[in-house]
């Protein structure tokens, strides 16, 4: 009886915090802290990297320390938290059985590429990671659109408005990146990704693809500004969505300007992971309060109901990183056997990227399906 009373009390407190009649996904404080103003975490990895250099560490050592810290502190838990909604949820496995079974192919592919062609693996990783980050942004944008249309203004947003939002988000990351590719200076750590990019896109004297991408981005930016001004003067501007998109575009455009792209993108990854954990735990908590987890994901439900906040879910996600640690150790030993005399940086990179990407790419794979569920938060507004 005591447990039931506490659970009911937590449910009532949690529900009371949700702003059902405004544009915010949960409430103003939560949205600003976890979704929008959490942008302040973006420069932190790069500042830590520079601090390491100033402290006398070698460039690669400082870079790898930052990579490891981000992976353990937030990148890894965000990656593993996906499985709280997929691999540990019977409803998801029944809905997408082929997706779950086919996921085993990904670690095999990662290990093969790590030993055979690291540059190709990292090139593919960069572009899939970029698409994944931008897909998450459009997903959050669509969550704002869905709440506005169904629960706030009760009106459908125009297809043109959606198209402009998507266009500015999906093009913002690439102008500067395409410039570096065209000049043949696109490197991640010790790996030159230009080796895996066709020469057609690497023409310093004729950066045609950079010009094309920049023109598309410029058209999207102009359209976005005109649309936002129009919506503001007609009193229909979705302020939370506008703030989120605007900051995202600014950060995505500027991030590739930094010389150390490996650490620069860790900043974007940190912000992305912070948002992902918040959204994921919010969705899980809503399902737990609605009683959906007890039957479909009892282990996840056990951690979700422990506290009103998400500390237990974060701890559970972080604990799942033991799988990555085991793969890192095995591949590190294997790399020394398969490639005797390998240099220290390459040795670490093979083990690190294999341990991370084996799970990270499954996380991308599953999220392409999770990011189509725009009704995931409806239970919070209808209750």
Image (cartoon, grey):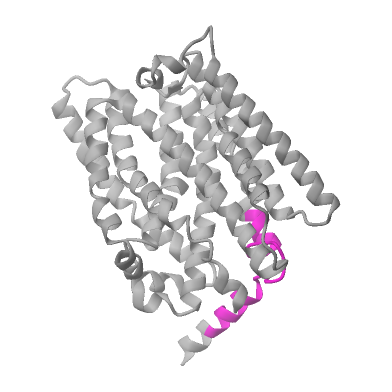
Q: In terms of image quadrants, where is residue 151? A: bottom right
The residue most toward the top is 205
Question: Would you place residue 268 above or below residue 77 in this image?
Answer: above
Q: Quadrant of the C terminus?
A: bottom right
Name the one closer to the observer, 231 or 261.
Answer: 231
Q: Position of residue 368 (x, y in %)?
A: 42, 51
Does residue 235 appear left or right of residue 288 in this picture? right
Kindly tell me whether residue 270 is visible in this rendering: yes
Q: Position of residue 58 (x, y in %)?
A: 43, 21
Does residue 187 appear left or right of residue 111 in this picture? right
Question: For the point 38% across and 28% down, which residue is it?
Answer: 123
Q: What's drawn in magenta, residue-wise?
A: 8-33
The residue most toward the front is 159
Q: Position of residue 30 (x, y in %)?
A: 64, 60
Q: Is residue 257 magenta?
A: no
Name the one closer to the observer, 259 or 55.
Answer: 259
Count of residue discs: 0
Question: For the point 63% across and 58% down, which residue is it?
Answer: 144
Question: Would you place residue 94 above or below residue 109 in this image?
Answer: below
Does residue 217 appear left or right of residue 118 in this picture? right
Question: Would you place residue 46 above or below residue 163 in this image?
Answer: above
Question: Would you place residue 347 above or below residue 375 in this image?
Answer: above
The residue most toward the right is 233
Q: Position of residue 87 (x, y in %)?
A: 32, 61
Name the one closer to the observer, 341 or 82.
Answer: 82
Q: Is residue 12 magenta?
A: yes
Question: For the point 63% across and 25% down, which residue is it?
Answer: 215
Kindly tell me whether residue 310 is visible in this rendering: no
The residue most toward the bottom is 1
């Amino acid at each position: 009886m005591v447990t039931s009373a506490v659970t009911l009390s937590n449910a009532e407190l949690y529900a009371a915090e949700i702003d059902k009649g405004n544009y915010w996904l949960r409430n103003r404080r939560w949205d600003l802290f976890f979704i929008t103003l959490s942008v302040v975490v973006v420069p932190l990895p790069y500042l830590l990297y520079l601090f390491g250099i100033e402290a006398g560490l070698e460039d690669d050592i400082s870079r790898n320390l930052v990579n490891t810290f981000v992976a353990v502190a937030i990148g890894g838990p965000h990656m593993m938290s996906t499985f709280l909604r997929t691999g540990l949820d019977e409803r998801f496995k029944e809905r997408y059985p082929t997706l779950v079974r086919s996921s085993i192919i990904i670690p095999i592919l990662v290990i093969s590429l790590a030993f055979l062609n690291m540059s190709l693996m990292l090139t593919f990783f960069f572009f899939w990671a970029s698409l994944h980050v931008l897909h998450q942004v459009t997903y959050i944008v669509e969550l704002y659109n869905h709440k506005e249309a169904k629960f706030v203004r009760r009106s459908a947003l125009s297809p043109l408005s959606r198209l402009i939002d998507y266009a500015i988000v999906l093009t913002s990351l690439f102008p500067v990146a395409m410039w570096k590719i065209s000049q043949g200076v696109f490197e991640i750590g010790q790996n030159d990704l230009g080796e895996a990019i066709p020469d057609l896109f690497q023409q310093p004297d004729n950066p045609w693809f950079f010009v094309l991408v920049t023109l598309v981005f410029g058209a999207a930016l102009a359209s976005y500004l005109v649309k936002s001004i129009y919506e503001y003067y007609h009193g229909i501007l979705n302020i939370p969505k506008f703030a989120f998109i605007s900051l995202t575009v600014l950060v995505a455009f500027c991030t590739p300007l930094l010389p150390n792209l490996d650490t620069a993108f860790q900043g974007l990854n940190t912000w992305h992971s912070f948002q992902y954990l918040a959204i994921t735990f919010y969705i899980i908590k809503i399902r737990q309060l609605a009683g959906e987890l007890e039957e479909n994901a009892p282990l996840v439900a056990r951690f979700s109901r422990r506290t009103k906040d998400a500390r237990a879910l974060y701890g559970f996600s972080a604990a799942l990183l033991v799988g990555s640690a085991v793969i890192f150790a095995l591949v590190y030993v294997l790399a020394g056997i398969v490639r005797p005399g390998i240099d220290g940086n390459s040795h670490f990179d093979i083990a690190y990227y294999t341990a991370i990407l084996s799970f990270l790419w499954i996380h991308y794979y599953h999220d392409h399906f999770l990011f189509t569920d725009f009704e995931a938060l409806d239970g919070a507004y209808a209750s």
